[in-house]
C-alpha cells in the first residue's frame, strides 16, 4: 500500500511539473498533447500499453466533442444574447457581476497578479480532468469507466444544447453593445505568454465555438471531478471543491460566462454523474448475467454430451 501511495505521489508531482512547464513554454494544453504527458507518466508506472489501450478511446471522445462543438454554431446562428442578461439582472438587482468585477479589479493595459492567476486556472480546463481520469484508472478501472461515461454524457449533452440554444458569453454581448464594456482578459494576458516550443496538435484543425456558453464546461468539468472524488476518495474531495469554486469565480471575472451558465452546467453534471453510475451498474449486471448464462449452457451441453 505504501508503494502504491508513493506511485501516486510521484505521478502527481510529475503531472504538476509537466503542466507548469507546458504553460511556461506557451504550449496549449490540448487533450492530444496531454495524452503524451500521461503516456510518459504511465511508462514510469510500467503500464504504458495498458494505458494506451484504455485511454485512447477516452481521448477520442473528448476530441470528437470538441470537433462537433466547433461547427454546430454554423448550423444554428440564432444567437441568444438577451435571455442570460435578463436572468442575471433579475438575480443581481439589475447588475452584471462580470461588469462590476472588472470595473473594480481590472486595470486595462496593466494586468494584476490575479489576472495571471485567473488565466492560469482557466488553462487547466483539460489538464485537471485528464489527470484525475488517470488517477481513477490507476486506482480501479471501474472508477475510470464511470468517469469516462459521465464525461461523455456531460460533453455530448452540452453539444446538443449548443446546437439547439447557442448563447453568447458576456464579452461577446458587450462587443455587440448589449451590456457595458467587458474585456476578454484571458486573451489579453495570454498574449504575454511566450510560445518557446510549438508542438503539433490536431486542434489546429478544429474551429472554436464562440457561442457555446450554456452549459459552461469550464464550470462543469471541475464539478464533475469533485463529484467523482467525493464518491471514490471521500474526504480527499475537499481538495477538488475549492478548485471548482475558484474556477466559477474566474470564468465570471474573465467575462467568459454568466452565473446562469454555471448553474446549468452543474445541473448537467449531476445528471451525467448519476446516469454514469446507473449505466455501469446495469452493464456489469448484464455482463454477469450473460456470463452465468453461458456457463449454464456450457455445463448443460457437457452433461448432454456425456449422457450421449
Image: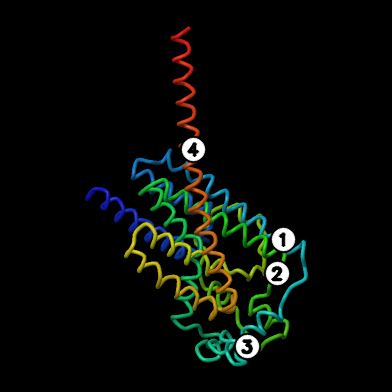
Looking at the rendered structure, which numbered label has been put on residue 72? Answer: 1
Asked if marks 1 and 2 touch (Cβ < 8 Å), the reply is yes
Seen from the viewer's position, the closer of residues 35 and 188 is 35
Q: Earlier in the sequence, mark 4 or mark 3?
A: 3
Q: Earlier in the sequence, mark 2 or mark 3?
A: 3
Q: Residues within 10 Å of mark 1 (few under 14, many from 20)?
A: many
Name the residue that disc number 4 marks: 287
Q: CA distance from mark 4 to mark 3?
A: 51 Å
Mark 4: secondary structure = helix
In the rendered view, would you say 269 is above or below 109? Answer: above
Seen from the viewer's position, the closer of residues 193 and 300 is 300
**Is residue 108 toward the left or the right of residue 205 in the image?**
left
Q: CA distance from mark 2 to mark 4?
A: 39 Å
Name the residue that disc number 3 marks: 89
In the rendered view, would you say 212 is above or below 142? Answer: below
Q: Residues within 10 Å of mark 3 (few under 14, many from 20)?
A: few
Asked if marks 2 and 3 touch (Cβ < 8 Å), the reply is no
Name the residue that disc number 2 marks: 166
Q: Residue at x 45, y 26 (%)?
A: 295
In the rendered view, would you say 271 is above or below 258? Answer: above
Please provide percent x and percent y for residue 106. 52, 87
Q: Residues within 10 Å of mark 2 (few under 14, many from 20)?
A: many
Q: Residue at x 55, y 79 (%)?
A: 252
Q: Earlier in the sequence, mark 1 or mark 2?
A: 1
Q: Residue at x 34, y 57 (%)?
A: 12
Mark 3: secondary structure = helix
Q: CA distance from mark 4 to mark 1?
A: 36 Å
Mark 1: secondary structure = helix
Q: CA distance from mark 1 to mark 3?
A: 28 Å
Q: CA distance from mark 1 to mark 2?
A: 9 Å
Q: Please identify the residue farthest to the top as the structure is shown.
A: 308
Camera-side mark, 1 or 3? 3
Amino acid at each position: 500500500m505504501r508503494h502504491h501511495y508513493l506511485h501516486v505521489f510521484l505521478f502527481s508531482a510529475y503531472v504538476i511539473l509537466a503542466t507548469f512547464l507546458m504553460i511556461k513554454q506557451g504550449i496549449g494544453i490540448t487533450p492530444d498533447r496531454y495524452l503524451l504527458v500521461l503516456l510518459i507518466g504511465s511508462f514510469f508506472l510500467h503500464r504504458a500499453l495498458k494505458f494506451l489501450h484504455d485511454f485512447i478511446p477516452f481521448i477520442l471522445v473528448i476530441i470528437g466533442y470538441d470537433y462537433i462543438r466547433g461547427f454546430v454554431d454554423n448550423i444554428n446562428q440564432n444567437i441568444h444574447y438577451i435571455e442570460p442578461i435578463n436572468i442575471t439582472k433579475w438575480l443581481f438587482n439589475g447588475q452584471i457581476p462580470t461588469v462590476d468585477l472588472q470595473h473594480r479589479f481590472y486595470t486595462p493595459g496593466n494586468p494584476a497578479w490575479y489576472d495571471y492567476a485567473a488565466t492560469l486556472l482557466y488553462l487547466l480546463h483539460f489538464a485537471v480532468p485528464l489527470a484525475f481520469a488517470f488517477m481513477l484508472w490507476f486506482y480501479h478501472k471501474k472508477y475510470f469507466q464511470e468517469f469516462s461515461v459521465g464525461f461523455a454524457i456531460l460533453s455530448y449533452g452540452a453539444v446538443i444544447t449548443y446546437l439547439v440554444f447557442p448563447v453568447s458569453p458576456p464579452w461577446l454581448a458587450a462587443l455587440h453593445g448589449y451590456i457595458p464594456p467587458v474585456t476578454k482578459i484571458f486573451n489579453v494576458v495570454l498574449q504575454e505568454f511566450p510560445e518557446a516550443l510549438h508542438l503539433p496538435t490536431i486542434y489546429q484543425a478544429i474551429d472554436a465555438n464562440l457561442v457555446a456558453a450554456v452549459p459552461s464546461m469550464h464550470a462543469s468539468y471541475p464539478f464533475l471531478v469533485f463529484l467523482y472524488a467525493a464518491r471514490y476518495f471521500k474526504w480527499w474531495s475537499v481538495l477538488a471543491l475549492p478548485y471548482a469554486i475558484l474556477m466559477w469565480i474566474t470564468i465570471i471575472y474573465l467575462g467568459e460566462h454568466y452565473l446562469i451558465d454555471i448553474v446549468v452546467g452543474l445541473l448537467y453534471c449531476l445528471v451525467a454523474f448519476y446516469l454514469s453510475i446507473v449505466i455501469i451498474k446495469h452493464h456489469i449486471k448484464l455482463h454477469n448475467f450473460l456470463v452465468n448464462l453461458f456457463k449454464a449452457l456450457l455445463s448443460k451441453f457437457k452433461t448432454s454430451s456425456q449422457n450421449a
